[in-house]
Amino acid sequence: MTTLEKAIEVYGKDMQLNVAIEEFSELIKEICKHKRGEDNLDNIIEEMADCYIMLEQMELIFDIDFSQINDKIVEKKNRLEKRLAEPKDSEMKPCCKCGCEAELISSQTFAWCNIYWYVICTNENCEEKTMLKYDTKRDAISAWNRRANNEL
Protein backbone atom coordinates (compact mmCIF):
# COMPACT_ATOMS: atom_id res chain seq x y z
CA MET A 1 0.00 0.00 0.00
CA THR A 2 1.38 3.42 -0.98
CA THR A 3 1.63 6.35 1.41
CA LEU A 4 -1.22 8.13 -0.38
CA GLU A 5 -3.46 5.04 -0.25
CA LYS A 6 -2.70 4.70 3.47
CA ALA A 7 -3.59 8.38 4.06
CA ILE A 8 -6.97 7.81 2.39
CA GLU A 9 -7.55 4.68 4.46
CA VAL A 10 -6.57 6.31 7.76
CA TYR A 11 -8.25 9.70 7.32
CA GLY A 12 -11.09 8.73 4.97
CA LYS A 13 -12.03 9.88 1.50
CA ASP A 14 -14.26 12.74 2.64
CA MET A 15 -11.57 14.20 4.91
CA GLN A 16 -8.95 13.98 2.17
CA LEU A 17 -11.28 15.77 -0.23
CA ASN A 18 -11.64 18.51 2.40
CA VAL A 19 -7.86 18.69 2.68
CA ALA A 20 -7.65 18.97 -1.12
CA ILE A 21 -9.99 21.96 -1.01
CA GLU A 22 -7.86 23.52 1.75
CA GLU A 23 -4.63 22.98 -0.18
CA PHE A 24 -6.07 24.47 -3.38
CA SER A 25 -7.27 27.45 -1.33
CA GLU A 26 -3.82 27.93 0.17
CA LEU A 27 -2.32 28.02 -3.33
CA ILE A 28 -4.90 30.60 -4.38
CA LYS A 29 -4.00 32.69 -1.31
CA GLU A 30 -0.28 32.61 -2.21
CA ILE A 31 -1.03 33.57 -5.82
CA CYS A 32 -3.06 36.55 -4.56
CA LYS A 33 -0.18 37.62 -2.31
CA HIS A 34 2.21 37.38 -5.26
CA LYS A 35 -0.10 39.54 -7.38
CA ARG A 36 -0.04 42.15 -4.59
CA GLY A 37 3.77 42.26 -4.84
CA GLU A 38 4.88 39.77 -2.19
CA ASP A 39 8.07 37.83 -2.95
CA ASN A 40 6.70 34.39 -2.04
CA LEU A 41 7.87 32.00 -4.75
CA ASP A 42 8.97 29.41 -2.17
CA ASN A 43 5.45 29.43 -0.66
CA ILE A 44 3.88 29.07 -4.11
CA ILE A 45 6.13 26.09 -4.86
CA GLU A 46 5.27 24.49 -1.52
CA GLU A 47 1.51 24.93 -2.07
CA MET A 48 1.80 23.62 -5.64
CA ALA A 49 3.51 20.50 -4.26
CA ASP A 50 0.66 20.04 -1.77
CA CYS A 51 -1.86 20.40 -4.62
CA TYR A 52 -0.05 17.83 -6.75
CA ILE A 53 -0.15 15.39 -3.83
CA MET A 54 -3.86 15.99 -3.34
CA LEU A 55 -4.52 15.57 -7.06
CA GLU A 56 -2.80 12.17 -6.87
CA GLN A 57 -5.03 11.25 -3.93
CA MET A 58 -8.08 12.36 -5.91
CA GLU A 59 -7.03 9.97 -8.70
CA LEU A 60 -7.13 7.18 -6.12
CA ILE A 61 -10.36 8.33 -4.46
CA PHE A 62 -12.24 8.55 -7.76
CA ASP A 63 -10.46 5.57 -9.36
CA ILE A 64 -9.17 7.69 -12.25
CA ASP A 65 -6.32 6.47 -14.41
CA PHE A 66 -3.82 9.22 -15.20
CA SER A 67 -4.21 8.47 -18.90
CA GLN A 68 -7.78 9.82 -18.63
CA ILE A 69 -6.43 13.05 -17.16
CA ASN A 70 -3.65 13.22 -19.71
CA ASP A 71 -6.17 12.85 -22.55
CA LYS A 72 -8.06 15.86 -21.17
CA ILE A 73 -4.80 17.81 -20.78
CA VAL A 74 -3.92 17.17 -24.42
CA GLU A 75 -7.47 18.11 -25.51
CA LYS A 76 -7.40 21.37 -23.54
CA LYS A 77 -3.92 22.32 -24.74
CA ASN A 78 -5.00 21.71 -28.34
CA ARG A 79 -8.08 23.88 -27.77
CA LEU A 80 -5.88 26.62 -26.30
CA GLU A 81 -3.53 26.42 -29.25
CA LYS A 82 -6.50 26.77 -31.61
CA ARG A 83 -7.85 29.76 -29.66
CA LEU A 84 -4.46 31.45 -29.72
CA ALA A 85 -4.39 31.07 -33.50
CA GLU A 86 -7.78 32.75 -33.90
CA PRO A 87 -7.99 36.45 -34.78
CA LYS A 88 -7.52 39.19 -32.21
CA ASP A 89 -9.25 42.58 -32.16
CA SER A 90 -6.44 44.08 -34.23
CA GLU A 91 -6.88 41.36 -36.85
CA MET A 92 -10.40 42.31 -37.91
CA LYS A 93 -10.67 42.42 -41.65
CA PRO A 94 -12.10 45.42 -43.47
CA CYS A 95 -15.73 45.49 -44.56
CA CYS A 96 -16.43 43.12 -47.45
CA LYS A 97 -18.86 45.65 -49.00
CA CYS A 98 -16.99 48.98 -48.87
CA GLY A 99 -13.50 48.16 -47.59
CA CYS A 100 -13.73 50.46 -44.55
CA GLU A 101 -12.50 49.55 -41.07
CA ALA A 102 -14.68 47.52 -38.74
CA GLU A 103 -15.52 48.23 -35.12
CA LEU A 104 -16.18 45.75 -32.32
CA ILE A 105 -19.27 46.77 -30.30
CA SER A 106 -20.40 45.52 -26.89
CA SER A 107 -23.99 45.72 -25.78
CA GLN A 108 -25.99 44.85 -22.71
CA THR A 109 -29.78 44.93 -22.60
CA PHE A 110 -30.05 45.24 -18.82
CA ALA A 111 -27.42 45.59 -16.09
CA TRP A 112 -28.05 42.01 -14.94
CA CYS A 113 -27.76 40.55 -18.46
CA ASN A 114 -24.63 39.25 -20.10
CA ILE A 115 -22.67 41.49 -22.41
CA TYR A 116 -22.78 40.44 -26.04
CA TRP A 117 -20.62 41.45 -29.00
CA TYR A 118 -21.05 42.25 -32.65
CA VAL A 119 -19.05 43.99 -35.39
CA ILE A 120 -20.14 46.82 -37.64
CA CYS A 121 -18.65 48.73 -40.55
CA THR A 122 -17.44 52.23 -39.54
CA ASN A 123 -18.72 53.73 -42.80
CA GLU A 124 -21.99 55.55 -41.96
CA ASN A 125 -23.32 54.83 -45.47
CA CYS A 126 -22.69 51.09 -45.18
CA GLU A 127 -25.01 48.94 -43.10
CA GLU A 128 -22.77 45.88 -43.02
CA LYS A 129 -22.64 44.11 -39.62
CA THR A 130 -22.49 40.64 -38.15
CA MET A 131 -25.96 39.15 -38.34
CA LEU A 132 -25.92 37.75 -34.81
CA LYS A 133 -24.75 38.90 -31.41
CA TYR A 134 -22.02 36.78 -29.83
CA ASP A 135 -21.07 35.92 -26.27
CA THR A 136 -17.36 36.55 -26.85
CA LYS A 137 -15.28 39.10 -28.71
CA ARG A 138 -13.44 36.30 -30.48
CA ASP A 139 -16.67 34.76 -31.82
CA ALA A 140 -17.91 38.12 -33.13
CA ILE A 141 -14.58 38.84 -34.84
CA SER A 142 -14.41 35.36 -36.33
CA ALA A 143 -17.94 35.77 -37.73
CA TRP A 144 -17.01 39.18 -39.19
CA ASN A 145 -13.85 37.84 -40.76
CA ARG A 146 -15.80 34.98 -42.35
CA ARG A 147 -18.11 37.62 -43.88
CA ALA A 148 -15.06 39.49 -45.13
CA ASN A 149 -14.00 36.27 -46.87
CA ASN A 150 -17.56 35.73 -48.19
CA GLU A 151 -17.65 32.44 -46.26
CA LEU A 152 -21.26 32.77 -45.07
Image (cartoon, rainbow, N blue to C red):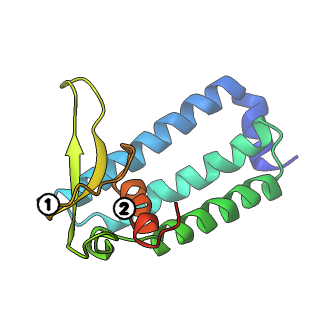
Q: Position of residue 16 (x, y in %)?
A: 64, 32
Q: Nearer the viewer, residue 71 or 35?
A: 71
Q: Residue at x 28, y 57 (%)?
A: 128
Disc 2 or 1, which lies upstream in sequence?
A: 1
Q: Position of residue 58 (x, y in %)?
A: 70, 41
In the rendered image, residue 3, in percent from the top left (x then y), is placed at 76, 48
Residue 9, quarter of picture? top right
Q: Which residue does the image show at 82% across and 50% down from the upper left?
A: 2
**How many numbered marks, from 0 up?**
2
Residue closer to the observer: 97 or 105 = 97
Q: Is residue 112 left or right of residue 80?
A: left
Q: Residues within 10 Å of mark 1 (few under 14, many from 20)?
A: few
Whether residue 21 is situated above or below residue 26 in the rendered picture: above
Would you call the spot at circle 2 few (<14 residues within 10 Å), some (14-19), or many (20 or more)?
many
| Distance Cα–Cα, label 2 vs label 1 | 21 Å
Above or below: residue 96 compared with residue 139? below
Q: Residue at coordinates 46% horizontally, 71% vertically from top-left?
A: 84
Looking at the image, residue 17 sits to the left or right of residue 98; the answer is right
Tag 2 near tag 1, CB within 8 Å: no
Q: Label 1's element?
A: loop
Q: Nearer the viewer, mark 2 or mark 1?
A: 1
Q: Residue 70, which numbered label?
A: none
Q: Residue at x 41, y 50 (%)?
A: 27
Amino acid type at mark 1: Asn
Residue type, label 2: Ile
- Residue marked by disc 1: 125
Res. 141 mark: 2
